Amino acid sequence: LVNRDESVVNENANKDSRVFSTQRDLTAGAVAKAIGLKMLPPAVANAHLRGDIHWHDLDYTPFMAETNCCLIDFDYMLNHGFSIGNAEVEPAHSIQVAVTQMTQIIANVASSQYGGCSSDRTDQVLAPFAEKNYQKHLREFGSVIDDPAKLEALAVKQTKKDIYDALQTLEYQVNTLYSTQGQTPFVTVGFGLGTSWIEREIQKDILKIRILGLGKERRTAIFPKLVFTLKRDLNLKPEDPNYD
């Protein structure tokens, strides 16, 4: 590590070995590998050293009692509140707050394990919080707008902006986080099964933001990995209602 051996500093593409926190993690990983090999059955350790097999994540397991990957229950946590550090976090009441809470949860989970974090049915999980935005706009604009059609149109327009801004925040926050493992959290976002206008808007904006890219150079974001679900009679064929 000190001599910048490429087999060490470039072992994990998701770890920037120029960063001090990553250097500390790589140093700890070298120690964990040495101890981990002694913890494995001799036949397994020798097979790994010979290259007959590869014991994955030897810098964490079996030395550290950490989990690898997990599917985070964002739905429950965002709706019921949760605890992080010294803070009792209340349930979210808007999509902006819900997304910010998601990234806080991701950062903490990623620092407590060595694998990836997944969010399933993200469009459906976040939709109720965008609905809160929509209802709030109806109440606020309703005090000055009498025409129901104009009121509806304005509330929808503002809610769509809220959704886009929140999801853009998610993209930037995930890609600017560093966990205590010295790396950007490996995040996967699943979506595509929602059918309401809000759920569809979330789906479209996730894709729009990814296509747009990050920063002035519009670089494609590394994370989150996007997993779009295809379902027969929903979005698989041209005649399906959500095919668009």
Image (cartoon, rainbow, N blue to C red):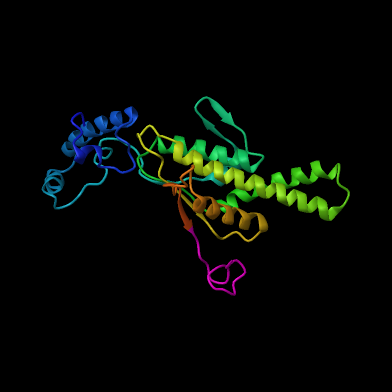
**What's the magenta bit mostly, secondary-structure-wise?**
loop
Q: Residue at x 39, y 35 (%)?
A: 112
> Which quarter of the rendering shows the C terminus?
bottom right
Q: Quadrant of residue 181?
A: top left
Q: Nearer the viewer, residue 215 or 43?
A: 215
Q: Residue at x 81, y 50 (%)?
A: 151
Note whether 48 is above or below 85 in the view shown. below
Note whether 27 is above or below 124 in the view shown. above
Magenta residue check for 157? no
- Residue farthest along the right direction in this orientation: 146
Q: Is residue 86 visible?
A: yes
Q: Is residue 129 visible?
A: no
Is 175 situated left or right of 32 in this image?
right
> Which quarter of the rendering shows the N terminus?
top left
Report x, y in % for residue 137: 76, 44
Magenta residue check for 239? yes
Report x, y in % for residue 96: 62, 40
Q: Nearer the viewer, residue 221 or 95?
A: 221
Note whether 232 is above or below 88 in the view shown. below
Note whether 96 is above or below 157 in the view shown. above
- Residue farthest along the top direction in this orientation: 86
Q: Residue at x 15, y 47 (%)?
A: 48
Is 120 situated left or right of 126 in this image?
left
Report x, y in % for residue 198: 65, 54
Report x, y in % for residue 156: 73, 51
- Residue farthest along the front direction in this orientation: 216
Is 157 situated left or right of 8 in this image?
right
Q: Which residues are magenta?
A: 228-244
Q: Nearer the viewer, residue 74 or 3?
A: 3
Is 157 situated left or right of 62 in this image?
right
